[in-house]
Image (cartoon, rainbow, N blue to C red):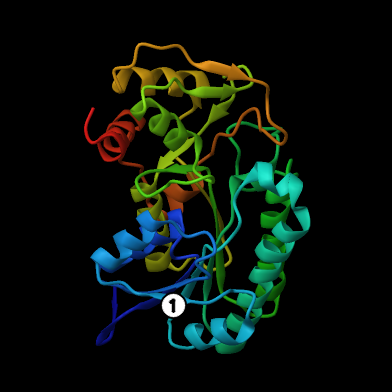
Amino acid sequence: EWRGERALRVLVTGGAGFIGHNLAIHLYERGFEPIVFDSLERSTEVALKRLRERGLSVVKGDVRDKYSFREQASKSDLVIHAAAYISVEESFERPGEYVSNNAGGTAVVASACLELGKPVIYISSAAVYGDPVRVPIPEDHPISPASPYGLSKALGEAVINFYGRLGLKYVIVRPFNVYGVGQTGPYAGVVTKFVERACRGEPPVIYGDGLQVRDFIHVSDFSRFVELVVEKEPWGEVFNAGTGVPTRILDLARLVIELAGLRAEPIYEKPRPGDIRVSLADVSKARRILGFEPRVGLREGILELIEYYCGGP
């Protein structure tokens, strides 16, 4: 945690987003000095409030703006690049913006960090794999995204790899389905959406048959995962961040219904474009190199969300 006399300064891009603000808070509580950098275009009041409560201020800036990013990166020891547009659905409507923001932003981050000699941890996505040909999915699985969002994250990885060949120190982390407190608004994940509906006494809405399989990792586990990467510095490596535990969407819906004490059945809607059938991480590499073990089970994680969003079960 400590290098010499002072705390490690970590610049978190997208630090007012769901994953970003949780990461910043986690690092702050572990003795690091996070610098939160965000355009605030898609930040939520919840995230900003949680950052404020800990005395963490947000530097407003866009990763696509070389000068404002460079200024903050030059003050830090390390950059965690989590800024991105994240909606699979929206990416089909606005593919150009997704590529420009997610891959273009990453190009600015990577080139500036190479010049400044700052290492980068790039928060990619399991969406780069697309529909898997092997399950659980290992890190050397073919990259074949099924949505413009997945494509934009895969292009971001290609950018990072390119600058890596020029000397950039980097690690690529591919989170699977991250969920937890502070995820809200139109871009929230399925766990939060199910819980928010349950709090209003409404049943979960399932797109498709509900037999899709996901790997849900609690945001506190994900934050610990990234902390281990910061600590161990396995430069040039790619890691899946998941639990390796498969959960069907239908079973998730039933669990939320049960824990929220609802008397209801899920509602089924037609499948959405770019929806992956099975997404399950092979986490053996992270276990071996980082010593990572998830701690928060899905039941426990959902109960925490119900308490948070519904004010108790």
- Report the amino acid beneath label 1: Val
The part of the image, by quadrant, that contains residue 295 is top left
Q: State the image coordinates of residue 310 (x, y, percent, origin top left).
A: 28, 34
Foreground pick, 126 / 101: 101
Work out whether residue 143 can be spotted.
no
5 lies left or right of 156 = left
Left or right of residue 101: residue 257 = left
Position of 127 relative to 227 (above/below):
above
Side of 161 where 67 appears, left or right: left
Residue 1 location (% of width, % of height): 29, 72
Looking at the rendering, in which quadrant would you find the C terminus?
top left
Q: Residue farthest to the front? A: 200
Could you say which is closer to the camera, residue 49 or residue 151?
A: 49
Q: Which residue is mark 1?
A: 59
- Write the residue at 43% across / 87% down: 75
Query: Relative to 268, does residue 60 appear above or below in the rendering?
Result: below
Q: Nearer the viewer, residue 156 or 57?
A: 57
